[in-house]
């Protein structure tokens, strides 16, 4: 089942890029490509923080655009930025109990 990917405005994208600038890389796409373990790890970070930075390593079997697209589709997250070999993904949290959600302009 495909997940609905949120469309962002220019203002929202700029806001998220600013928030993501200082984030550490929390996952890397290596020679195995899109593994189930990688997708689960990215899902957990998105659930907890909504914004995640992922590095695409040189030995990844996909080019950076394909890797970003596959990550986006697998997690239902929006590609905010693809800078070099670093992907910034955003997925709004649906949990109304969560207090530290990102508020988009």
Image (cartoon, rainbow, N blue to C red):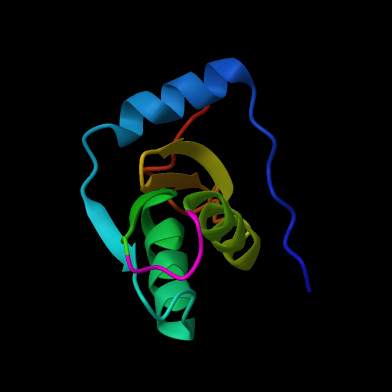
Q: Quadrant of the N terminus?
A: bottom right
Region of the chain picked out in magenta, as a range: 59-63
Considering depth in this image, is 101 or 38 the residue closer to the camera? 38
Extreme right residue here? 1
Q: Position of residue 94 (x, y in %)?
A: 59, 54
Q: Position of residue 21 (x, y in %)?
A: 28, 32
Residue at image position (60%, 54%) is 69
Extreme top residue here? 11
The majority secondary structure of the magenta stretch comes to loop
The answer to whether residue 12 is magenta is no
Q: Quadrant of the C terminus?
A: top right
> Does 75 sit left or right of 55 as displayed?
right
Considering depth in this image, is 20 or 85 the residue closer to the camera? 85
Residue at image position (42%, 66%) is 42
Residue at image position (38%, 72%) is 41
Q: Position of residue 17 (x, y in %)?
A: 40, 28
> Does 94 sit left or right of 52 as displayed?
right
> Does 65 sit left or right of 58 as displayed?
right
Would you say residue 105 is visible in this rendering? no
Would you say residue 28 is visible in this rendering? yes
> Does 41 sit left or right of 78 as displayed?
left
């Amino acid at each position: 089942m495909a997940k609905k990917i949120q469309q962002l405005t220019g203002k929202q994208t700029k806001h998220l890029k600013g928030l993501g600038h200082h984030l550490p890389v929390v996952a890397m796409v290596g020679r195995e490509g899109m593994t189930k373990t990688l997708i689960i790890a990215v899902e957990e970070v998105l659930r907890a923080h909504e914004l995640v930075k992922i590095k695409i390593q040189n030995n990844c079997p996909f080019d950076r655009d394909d890797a970003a697209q596959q990550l986006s589709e697998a997690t239902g997250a929006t590609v905010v930025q693809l800078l070099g070999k670093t992907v910034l993904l955003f997925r709004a949290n649906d949990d109304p109990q969560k207090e530290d959600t990102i508020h988009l302009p």
